[in-house]
Image (cartoon, helix red, strand yellow):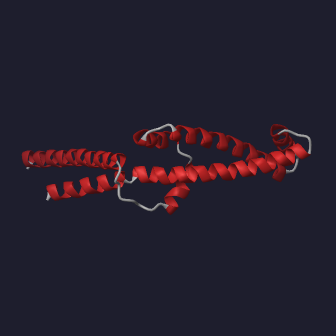
Amino acid sequence: MARVLMLIVLLMGGTATSQLPEFSQQYRQRLGGAIDALEEILADFNRDAAQHGMSSAEAIARQKASEDPFIRARGDSMLNAEIRLSRLKQQQSEYESAGPFERLMIFARGFDSQLAQATAEDYEPAVPVTVAGFASAGIGALAGLIVMRVLVGIARLGRRRQRQNG
């Protein structure tokens, strides 16, 4: 029974982690779309600021200094959009120069939570036919094996103590 359970855990762990490269790929595709959208929003904002003789930073500072709470909130939103765009562009640059395994590490190290959530909502699993997919499956299976070995060891230890006491 323990061997069957172990096999199930190995398969589940391997299957789950084999999806990491595909999830990362779908995240990268959304990353480009998010960058495009933020660039468009900020270009419009910068154009409006320039028409009124201000830089982007001056326009944001003016909004944040406003007594109108809505205008202040818009200033915060624009500043956050600039910061997020910079962060996403940096991540995209890292992805472009990385290999398949390194991309997984880049994602794990600093994904954008909004983007990851949107990716998860629309995620479509794929059969892993890449080296990274197979390696991820192997890592997941190995992790499952280790967890099962530890749990089986704990269960055996508990049974031994019961026999000694009973």
Name which residue lies at 24% across and 44% down. Answer: 146
Q: Is residue 67 left or right of residue 12?
A: right
Q: Is residue 119 left or right of residue 138?
A: right
Q: Position of residue 103 (x, y in %)?
A: 46, 42
Q: Quadrant of the N terminus?
A: bottom left
Q: Position of residue 128 (x, y in %)?
A: 35, 54
Q: Is residue 110 above or below residue 14?
A: above
Residue 74 visible? The answer is no
Name which residue lies at 57% across and 38% down. Answer: 93
* Viewer-closest of 49 and 165: 49
Q: Is residue 36 left or right of residue 139?
A: right
Q: Is residue 105 left or right of residue 113?
A: left
Q: Position of residue 83 (x, y in %)?
A: 68, 40
Q: Position of residue 61 (x, y in %)?
A: 83, 39
* Viewer-closest of 58 and 89: 89
Name which residue lies at 65% across and 43% down. Answer: 84
* Viewer-closest of 125 and 130: 130
